[in-house]
Image: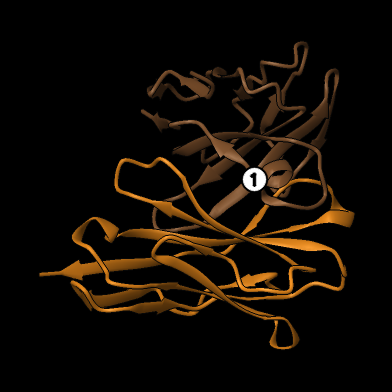
Chain colours: A brown, B orange
Amino acid sequence: DGGITQSPKYLFRKEGQNVTLSCEQNLNHDAMYWYRQDPGQGLRLIYYSQIVNDFQKGDIAEGYSVSREKKESFPLTVTSAQKNPTAFYLCASSGLGTSGRGSTEQFFGPGTRLTVL
Amino acid sequence: AQKITQTQPGMFVQEKEAVTLDCTYDTSDPSYGLFWYKQPSSGEMIFLIYQGSYDQQNATEGRYSLNFQKARKSANLVISASQLGDSAMYFCAMRENQAGTALIFGKGTTLSVSS
């Protein structure tokens, strides 16, 4: 089945540690995204990528890093510079079209819940 | 200024009743798309409905319809015949084509359906 997988589902980090969240898609989508969601809040964009080996910062990129070495994969690293990383992280992918649901809809993974101990 | 505004933090409705969740947006891009997603307590994001800025008719998907009023920059979600399983957080989102492909989300509305 086509879809997006994220791992792990739950992740615990100690102060000062870097951790990497995995996101893989087999939908053949060009674009991939990382969003952060805090309790009771909407999603905020961290980073996105529209092509392999290229990515752009979103609204809250500080303290995070990404890579896009393969079309299918877009891992997110939460660095020790991120002062308040406890949140729910969602990865998504989409096509690059500019109109119509089929080319613009974002498909989401199940999310990773990160907690700082 | 917020690009997507959802003014109802919480809404309560009884089963089988219809409910409208409000969403207003702000953009100067003539080409954009509007989305509604549902997020149950499990955290997954479920796509509900899409409306393109040039679509002439309001979008409908089963029990969901989008009341699109372009001049007012309003894109309200209407759920007809509410069910207990509709209890969830609902997010309105916009994609501005000139800005790329990422979505801008509102803060969401929590819908509670009671029997």
**At which x and y percent is residue B102?**
73, 47
What is the quadrant of residue A47 in the picture?
top right
Determine the residue located farthest toward the left in the rendered image: B115
Which of the pair A12/A104 is nearer the observer? A104
In the rendered structure, which amino acid carries the disc numbered 1? Glu
What is the quadrant of residue B19 in the picture?
bottom left
Q: How many marks?
A: 1
Q: Is residue A21 above or below residue B106?
A: above
**At which x and y percent is residue A27?**
63, 23
Q: Look at the image and tell me in which quarter the C terminus of chain B lies.
A: bottom left
Q: Look at the image and tell me in which quarter the N terminus of chain B lies.
A: bottom right
Determine the residue located farthest toward the bottom in the rendered image: B72
**At which x and y percent is residue B62?**
42, 60
Protein chain holding label 1 = A
**At which x and y percent is residue A34?**
63, 35
Q: Residue at 70% across / 69% down in the picture?
A: B3
Residue B17 located left or right of residue A35 = left
Q: Residue at 45% across / 39% down in the picture?
A: A88
Q: Is residue B11 above or below residue B50?
A: below
What is the quadrant of residue B51 in the picture?
bottom right
Label 1 belongs to which residue?
A: A105
Q: Residue at 24% across / 55% down in the picture?
A: B85
Q: Residue at 67% across / 40% down in the picture?
A: A46
